[in-house]
Image (tube, rainbow, N blue to C red):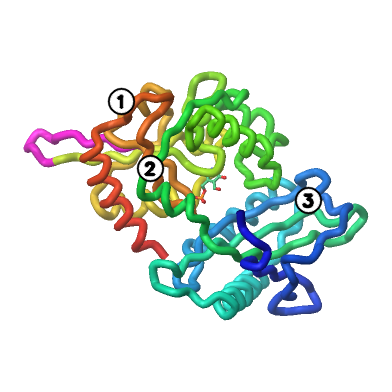
Amino acid sequence: MTSPASVVLVFLDSAFPDGRLADASQPQLLVTDQGATRGDGAFETMLAVGGNVRKIQAHLDRLDGSGKALDLAIPGQDQWRRAIAAAIAEHRSQHPPVSDADDELVVKLVVTRGAEGAAAPTAWVQVSPVGAGARRQRETGIDVILLDRGYDSDAAERAPWLLLGAKTLSYAVNMAALRHAHKQGADDVIFFSSDGRVLEGPTSTVLLAHVDKSDDGTPVKRLITPQLDSGILAGTSQGALFKAAKEAGWELGYGPLVPQDLLDADAVWLISSVRLLAPVNRIDGQEIGTPSLQKELTAELNELFAGIQ
Ligand code: PLP
């Protein structure tokens, strides 16, 4: 649980060019705000390391894309950048990092359709510490269950009003899936579509790796993720890691994947901006890959990912 005392809020407000600092322990939204009453809005969750947000341009671009899908006027990127810088600076001054290893913050951008009848959206930046759970799961890995997402992999194209590729505020289903997993003793979920394709986690992208030997005996490493047009959110972490892995000589693949591909992989991860790479130890109780190879590949990908700004 994040205590309001450790949260810094900066609202985007046309009267304040660098954003308006607000008290996170006090009410700040009208009860008619459509973000609260309908989950009508979009968000981004980013990681700041040493005060710098990683992949900020990719997050701001994805937020613009979510705004287009929702017909929602998203504030300009310069306005976001100023408010983000102000919020991070305020957090670091209120809670100075005690060590370099500790110098990570979660930076969340939220835009709602605003209060009913309002002309402008409500938009704010929220900065808070990274939870111990996310840090732990990077190290220990996670157990995952497979769950049916309830639509087929063509639904995004057939029914754009489902907003499947957008990062909307309507995450109640994603959170319900996580609670379902926790009740089964698992840590997380991998969704599959009704036509049997691997999709994504409720808050992460699925990655798998295969290591084969080429004819001359050198290892060929392949990193694979589900098809981006199958109704999943395009992960900024997956995108950045794929670019770095390609430069480091990995082969890349984009699905389609079925659950058996996960069970046959040498390693599987869930990747996202804050938790980073969480190695998947078991899926539906079945151990994945070989622990030593998983460890080696995780270390290599972590190093590549750490180099991304
Ligand atoms: N897929 C979903 C549904 C998500 O909610 C997230 C992040 O929260 C991701 C994938 C991973 O995205 P990113 O790597 O940009 O954090």
Some atom of ligand 1 lies within 8 Å of the CB belonging to the residue at label 3: no
Q: Which residue is mark 2?
A: 141
Q: Would residue 234 be found to the left or right of residue 169 on screen?
A: left
Q: Secondary structure at mark 2?
A: loop
**In front: mark 1 or mark 2?**
2
Disc 2 crowd rating (10 Å Cα; few below 14, some 14-19, many 20+) is: some
Whether pointer 1 and pointer 3 mark residues with C-beta atoms closer than 8 Å, the reply is no
Residue 67 in the image: state x and y as whole percent.
Answer: 69, 52
Q: Is residue 308 left or right of residue 73?
A: left
Q: Position of residue 78 (x, y in %)?
A: 63, 72
Report, in whole angstroms, how far the alpha carbon at label 1 lies from the one at label 2: 18 Å
Q: Are marks 1 and 2 in contact (CB under 8 Å)?
A: no
Residue ranking furthest to the top: 195
Name the image quarter holding the N terminus: bottom right
Disc 2 under 8 Å from ligand 1? The reply is: no
Q: Locate residue 177, reporting x and y percent.
A: 59, 32
Instruction: Please state the horizontal and vertical placement of residue 286, each as a whole percent of the image.
Output: 36, 24
Kindly identify the residue that appears in the image at 49 percent across and 73 percent down. 51
Residue picked out by circle 3: 35
State the residue in front, 22 or 154: 22
Residue at image coords 80%, 53%: 113
Type of the residue with mark 3: Gly
Label 3: element kind: helix
**Gap in angstroms between the C-alphas marked 3 and 2:** 33 Å
Furthest-left residue in this view: 216
CA separation in Å, label 1 and label 3: 41 Å
**Mark 1 belongs to which amino acid?**
Asp
Disc 2 residue type (three-letter) = Gly
Q: Residue at the location (90% across, 53% down)? A: 116
- The segment highlighted magenta reads 208-218
The image shows residue 214, relative to residue 72, as above or below, that is above
Which element type, helix, strand or loop, lies under badge 1?
helix
